[in-house]
């Protein structure tokens, strides 16, 4: 989250919509080849929408005072410090996000990925479902997007740190990692940038199979609730509503299977199958749509949306 521009999370959300409803963790090449048709079809609005009833204008309430509760700030700092101190880590993320249905109320879509990182310049993200399977590798010199089912690979030069690579991957290929703050060199600097509200909510004993402390944070882009392990200070869940989204769609990420400082072999950040796959350009989805695929490669047929039930629901 930066004052000079929207946060990575917000930027990824709205730009991905503009580029064809790209899934959060789907690589640009996967989105182009497989994901676009279904998502676009599902999100079509009805041809005619009923006119909203007229209502009398309401006076805006007084502005809410900015409050950063020490207990909430301390909780965020403790979690960020734990993450920043790890030289390597692995975890599982399940990401859920809402998308409007043809009837108006949102449907929810989910992706699952296994994340492995090693500071300062190694990252692997294996996205297994729902949606297209994809693999992403970063080794400090190059970043690689691999589509195993299509046997296609895209490779680009990359900056020498994870933080810089995250920005480069988005700029070059519209690849967005919603867990990026968790693997940043200084997670708290990202979470606290532009922060106007931070408040402690209480404890939960049902999230992540452990006791968690809950905090709420607000900046000019997002309202977010975060669950953090009471003992280990590791994130278990984050739930966000983007303030610039008129539909108020909700987005959630769940963390599990945390391992800090595991022993990682050098080959963890490479793939022999990717190295042998057919290369294609490392591009954004909008640019990929304008390119011709390599000779002999055919994009799969667009996925068909599910048939409507008798009552007309999706």
Image (cartoon, rainbow, N blue to C red):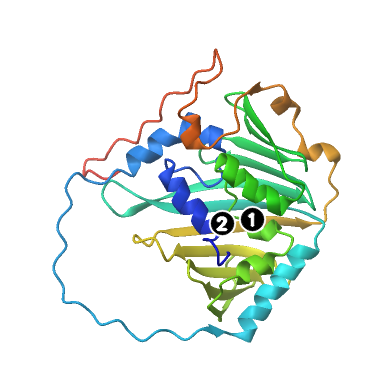
* Spot occupied by residue 203 in the image (x, y as percentages of width and height): 59, 77
Q: Where 120 falls versus 44 (above or below)?
A: below
Q: Are marks 1 and 2 in contact (CB under 8 Å)?
A: yes
Q: Residue at x 48, y 22 (%)?
A: 299
* Spot occupied by residue 193 in the image (x, y as percentages of width and height): 60, 70
Location of the N terminus (image quadrant): bottom right
Q: Where 180 falls versus 297 (above or below)?
A: below
**The furthest residue to the top:** 296
Crowd around label 1: few <14 · some 14–19 · many ≥20 (10 Å): some
One can see residue 132 in this view: no
Q: Determine which residue is flagged by label 2.
A: 8
| Horizontal side, residue 54 vs residue 129: left or right | left
Q: Secondary structure at mark 2?
A: helix
Q: CA distance from mark 1 to mark 2?
A: 8 Å
* Spot occupied by residue 147 in the image (x, y as percentages of width and height): 60, 30
Q: Residue at x 55, y 32 (%)?
A: 29
Q: Determine which residue is flagged by label 1.
A: 180
Q: Quadrant of residue 134?
A: top right
Q: Residue at x 33, y 84 (%)?
A: 61
Instruction: Pick whichever, 126 or 22, lies toward us.
Output: 22
Instruction: Pick whichever, 271 or 156, lies toward us.
Output: 156
């Amino acid at each position: 989250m930066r004052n000079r521009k929207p946060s990575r999370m917000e930027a990824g959300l709205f730009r991905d919509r503009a580029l064809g409803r790209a899934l959060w963790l789907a690589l640009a090449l996967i989105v182009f080849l497989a994901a676009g048709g279904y998502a676009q079809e599902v999100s079509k609005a009805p041809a005619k929408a009923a006119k909203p009833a007229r209502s009398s204008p309401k006076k805006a309430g007084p502005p809410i005072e900015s409050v950063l509760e020490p207990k909430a700030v301390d909780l965020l700092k403790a979690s960020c410090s734990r993450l920043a101190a790890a030289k390597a880590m692995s975890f599982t993320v399940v990401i859920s996000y809402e998308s409007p249905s043809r009837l108006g109320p949102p449907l929810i879509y989910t992706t699952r990925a296994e994340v492995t990182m090693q500071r300062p310049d190694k990252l692997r993200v294996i996205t297994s479902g729902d949606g297209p399977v994809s693999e992403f590798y970063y080794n400090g010199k190059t970043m690689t997007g691999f589509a195993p089912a299509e046997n296609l690979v895209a490779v680009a030069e990359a900056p020498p740190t994870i933080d810089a690579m995250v920005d480069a991957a988005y700029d070059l290929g519209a690849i967005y990692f919603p867990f990026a703050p968790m693997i940043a060199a200084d997670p708290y600097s990202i979470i606290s940038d532009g922060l106007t509200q931070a408040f402690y909510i209480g404890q939960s004993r049902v999230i992540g199979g452990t006791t968690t402390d809950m905090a709420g944070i607000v900046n000019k882009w997002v309202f977010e609730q975060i669950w953090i392990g009471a003992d280990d200070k590791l994130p278990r869940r984050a739930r966000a509503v983007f303030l610039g989204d008129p539909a108020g769609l909700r987005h959630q990420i769940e963390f599990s299977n945390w391992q800090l400082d595991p022993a990682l072999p050098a080959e963890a950040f490479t793939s022999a199958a990717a190295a042998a796959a057919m290369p294609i350009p490392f591009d954004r989805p909008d640019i990929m749509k304008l390119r011709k695929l390599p000779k002999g490669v055919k994009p799969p047929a667009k996925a068909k949306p599910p048939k409507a039930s008798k009552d007309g629901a999706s």
